[in-house]
Structure formats: C-alpha cells, structure tokens
Amino acid sequence: MDDPIYQQLAKHLEKLPGGFARSKSGADLRILQRLFSPGEAFVACHLALLPEDAQVVAYRSKLPLKQTQIVLDSLVKKRLITSFKQKGKMHYMAQQFVVGFWEGQVDHLDRELVEEFEEYLPAYAETGLWGKAPQLRVIPINKSISLQSSVMPYEQVTHILDTHQSFAIANCVCRQEQQLLGHNCGKPRETCLAFDGAVEYFIHSGRGREITRSEAEALIDQAEKSGLVLQPANTRNPGNICMCCGDCCGVLRGIKLKSKPADEVASDFYAVLNFELCTGCKICTRRCQMEALTVVDGKAILDLDRCIGCGLCVSTCKPGALKLARKNTKNLPDIPTDDIHLGIKMGRTHGQLGWGKIIMIFVRSGMDRIMARLNGDRNA
C-alpha cells in the first residue's frame, strides 16, 4: 500500500488544471490505490494535457508499445483517462481528478470508496480553488427569465442545446455517492447531460447513453420541476450540464456551508423579492438549495449573500413576488471562451500552469512525437 508510484501520480495530478490537494489523513493516496493498479498509475504519470497516441506514450514511459496499449485500454475502460479518435487513430490525454475521472466512476462506486472521497473533500475545499476559478457556473432555468431581461446566449439553456448536435445522459455521481451512504434525496438520478464530443466518450466508456434533443429538453424540464440547479461547464460553449441539488452535489454542499455562497459561484443573476406581493406560501423556501429564503410572520425574507441566481424560487412563485435581476457589469464573473481557456485559468490560479509551462508542454509533446516516430521506424 506504500508503493511510491502513487505519490508520483498524486504529484502528477496536482500539476493538472484542477489540482489534487493532499490529505493529511492519506485519503488522497488511498483513493488512487483503489482506482489505479501500480502499472496503470505508472503509465498515467506519462500522459500529457495534449492528445497523443500510444506510440508517444510508450516512448515517454520507456515501455514496449504492446504493453503500453494494454494499460491504456484498461485506463480508458476504467474511465481514468480521456481518449478519442483523431485522424482515425486513438489518442489519449491525462484527466484531472475533479471535475474529471472521479465523475467517471459513476456506476462503479462502492461504499468504501465513497467514504474515502468524503474524507478527502475537506482537503480539496481548503485550497479555495473552486471559489477563485469555478469549473461550473449557475444559469437560470428558462421559466425564471423575463423576456425583458438582458440575457446573453450562453446564459440560456435553450441556446446551449441549440449549439449542439448530439446528446448523452448519465447518472449523477454525487447522488449515487449519497445513496450509497444511506442518504436518498429522492430526486432523479439521470441528470448528467453531455454534448457532441463528450457523447462518443460517454457511450464508448459505458458511462451514459445517447438521447435525442427532445429527450434533453424533457430532462431540463424535469430538473426544474424537481428543484435542481442547472450547472453547465464554466465556459461560453459548455460541453455538459449538471443538474444538481444542495443535498448531494459536492459543489453545492460545500458552498452551502459557507456564510456567503453567492461569492463562491459563477452566476450572472440574483433574486429580487417584492415584499408586498409575498403571500408567505413557503414554496420558495423548499425550492432554494442554499437556504437563502425564510418566511417570518407570513412574509419571505431573502438573504442575497446566499442567493446563487438559479431561479428555482422564481418559476413557482405564483404571486410574482420573486424575480431574477442581472448583476452590474462590474460584478459579473469572467466566463472563459472554451474548455482550453478554462483549463488555463484554473491552472494559473493555483500556480501550476503559467505560460512558460504551457509552452513547454507543447515543446515536449512535439519532441516526443518526433522521437517516437524515429524510434518506431528503427524498430520496424
């Protein structure tokens, strides 16, 4: 259990955009030991943030190509790395822990592994990385947005669906974790929505199933009715949407414990309460995932420090006492263009991915590709 390869893998994961915080209890290494065999951990340490074929990985790890391919196939099957076809050939990339290969363990979890993860979570939260560079953002559900509101396309779930051609759905890893621990929130489990490039990976790895556009729309409607917060990737062109609750979601559970959850999320909106119109029905208090609303003396009270702008309180407020308003421009969070820019922002935020390191990643990968080809030609 003390194989140094897991220390090496932990250091490798820490260099990725999402980081890998170390746990004083050792839960970090125990998780890696449960997920990776020593041979898999060794090969994983030689994967880059750029897509590379097995020949390049074999050259870098100094392993025979056949052995490297077997290990890579195993890592893909276990959803521990990213893989996809490029020019008709399989390519492989390192995958960070969260959001990354941990979510890929959905349907592969057991209680012991989940307990290790719960023990590890405080170490990750202590880094404060999520609040500085959130990987997900909160967007309002359609029914909560007024036609008069100034809403950007990437803030509308219907527009996000419009920009994609294929769709897949998978079980929520967070809800599954809590059910294994004996906590059942009673909300739907199939709530992890992926688009386009991620669809092939979901299907190939067995993580999810392909669905139609209309089925995706139905799942969004179901999320609204069930009181789930919509959290797409924090980019202007997200490749996924998580539908989350404050009881199970690792992100929402963490920020719910903060005194000011509003400061921890990327969200362009906040709720506005018309005290006079409120009838004190308490529906909003049951819908809010951050406990931002309470009812005192028959009237709702809104704590804006706890409001994350999801709109769940607005869509079911029959008297119209609750609306969403857009934040001032100076208070709007920065939304990266795509996953690459999000990864760079995350990596730079925790000091592991400056421009110099980014350049070296490209240089090293390019050199290794050349040397792998030359080495392959000599051995042909």
Image (cartoon, rainbow, N blue to C red):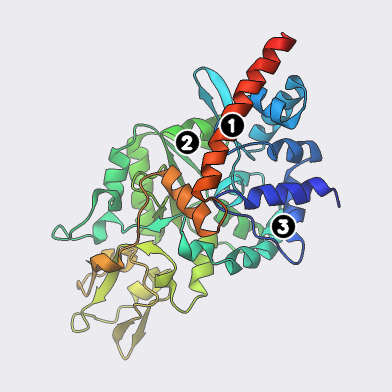
Disc 3 secondary structure class: helix
Identify the residue position indicated by label 2 in the image: 198
The three-letter amino acid code for the residue at tag 1 is Ser
Residue 11 in the image: x percent, y percent?
70, 51
Q: Say if mark 2 contacts mark 3, CB within 8 Å.
A: no
In the foreground, 231 or 179: 231
Q: Say if mark 2 contacts mark 1, CB within 8 Å.
A: no
Nearer-N-terminus badge (2/3): 3
Identify the residue position indicated by label 1 in the image: 365
Residue lying at 15% horizontally and 57% vertically, measured from the top left: 147
The three-letter amino acid code for the residue at tag 2 is Ala
In the foreground, 8 or 225: 8
- Tag in front: 2 or 3: 3
Asked whether residue 240 is in view, the answer is no
Disc 2 secondary structure class: helix
The three-letter amino acid code for the residue at tag 3 is Asp
Report, in whole angstroms, how far the alpha carbon at label 3 lies from the one at label 1.
28 Å
Quarter of the image with the C terminus in it: top right
Q: Is residue 139 above or below residue 357?
A: below
Asked whether residue 287 is in view, the answer is yes
- Tag in front: 2 or 1: 1
Identify the residue position indicated by label 3 in the image: 28
Residue 95 in the image: x percent, y percent?
59, 42
